[in-house]
Amino acid sequence: MLEALTGKVFATIVSLSVFLFSSYTGNDPAFRGLNSRAGEHYLQLRTSLVSAFDNDFPDVFKSGATIPVNFQLIIRNKSRTLLTRSYQNSVRYNPADAVFDVRTGGMNRKLQTASYPAMIAEVSGFECSLPYDPNWGNVTITLEASLPSVRFEQLQKKVDLMVLWKYQKPKISVQLNLQKIS
Amino acid sequence: MKISRPGIRTWILLLYLVVSIGGLLILNNVFQTSQQRIQDAMNDLELSGELRQVQLFSHADSLKVEKIMKTYGEAKGIIKLSLSESRFYVALTLFFIIIVSSLVFLVVLTRISKPIRELKNATDQIRQGNFSVHIPETGIHEMKQLKNSFNVMSRELENVQKRLLVAEKEMIWKDLSRILAHEIKNPLTPHPACGAAFGRAAGDRSGFRSPDPE
């Protein structure tokens, strides 16, 4: 509750200060609605990030360093945490061949593409399949994305990528009744 | 409708807004413009595409070119990130400076204007004849001194007023006693003359002469 309030206050301050005093646009990442599908024993979740990699990211992706995107999934029943999972998508650009190597953590997929939009579509996507217990009943599924600090090996420099998201972590929550679904 | 003349507080506020915040905004604008120019120049800078066209004859050469491309790519990425970072933090810092300095300014202004208001009210009371007015010596150092001087002045005025009252009372008593003495003396003045006249009249009848009053 307090964390959410602090986050909202900070986001307002950041948006206001950037709007008033800077020509910096940055990115305002958000999740498209979280789709869920329940199998017999597995729950499949799918969503993607929007407006997350529009500004300033082309040069960062083309830097040649591995750029990870972290996802954290938490399933709660009221205040009880039932399941926590972390996933990571990553992009690495090969300047010699001008291709992007994309790995998506949720489904363990690999893609090699020269197309920037295809790379963005792949790295923005989140898809996972996880076991569940129908007795969990009413649950809240929360998914949060973040960018870590990246170390540029050639220049031996570490930079926090969250600045490109104006230190705002996109978050989405949905409520599911697992007993009904199963 | 009567428009009142702006007070000193308004003038200080206006001066602060124009000089302080205005100056910061101009400085920020200059900074943002130069950052934007660097950003535009960075967008036009492309090297890897040209390097990929170069014909390489040995593995060592291709490794060198690959290293150049990687270093160039990382440098470009770091510059882009650093530019974004600086523009973001400058905006945030400027916002905090304006908020914090405005709050500090308002606090200081209140701590100056409130004692001035108190002094004005106390002066009004003195003008109406209430010399016993006393204001608490709170606030910033200079204000404490000013209030202390005012309190000393009001105390002295009160003492002077008391002394004047005492002197006035004494004068009234003196006047009253003088008047009373006069009033008592006046009716008694004819009595000796009357006594003498009665004495003479009685002496004439008995054959004795009363001594001449003169």
Image (tube, coloured by chain):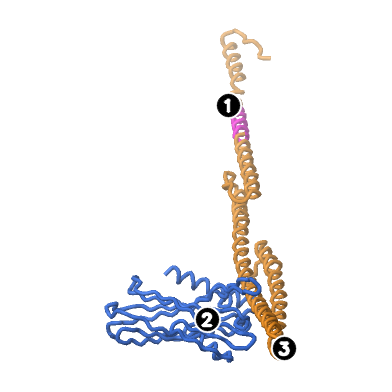
Instruction: Give amino acid for label 2.
Output: Ser
Task: Please tell me which residue lies in front, B66 or A164.
Answer: B66
The numbered mark 2 sits on a residue in which chain? A
Choose top left, top right, bottom left or bottom right for residue B67.
Answer: bottom right
Q: Residue furthest front?
A: B58
- Residue sitting at x 59%, y 88%: A99
Task: Please tell me which residue lies in front, A54 or A102.
Answer: A102
Quarter of the figure with the N terminus of chain B:
bottom right
Q: Which residue is mark 1?
A: B184
Residue A89 visible in image: yes
Q: Which residue is mark 2?
A: A90
In-image side of A132 versus B128 (left or right): left
Quarter of the figure with the C terminus of chain B:
top right
What's drawn in magenta, residue-wise? B167-184
Label 2, label 3: how far apart the Cα atoms are: 33 Å
Query: Dots 2 and 1: beta carbons under 8 Å?
Result: no
Q: Number of labelled discs?
A: 3
Measuring from the top left, give residue B94's x and y in whole percent.
Answer: 64, 69
Image depth: mark 2 or mark 1 in front: 2
Which chain is the one coloured orange?
Answer: B
Choose top left, top right, bottom left or bottom right for residue B120.
Answer: bottom right
Measuring from the top left, give residue B19's x and y in whole percent.
Answer: 71, 67
Helix, strand or loop at mark 2: strand
Q: Which residue is mark 3?
A: B57
Measuring from the top left, give residue A122's x and y in whole percent.
Answer: 51, 88
Measuring from the top left, give residue A53's x and y in whole percent.
Answer: 56, 84
Residue A55 vertical placement versus B113 (above, below): below
Instruction: Give amino acid for label 3.
Output: Phe
Instruction: Give amino acid for label 1.
Output: Ile
Q: Does residue B178 show up magenta in the picture?
A: yes
Residue B87 visible in image: no
Per the rendering, the colour in which chain A appears is blue
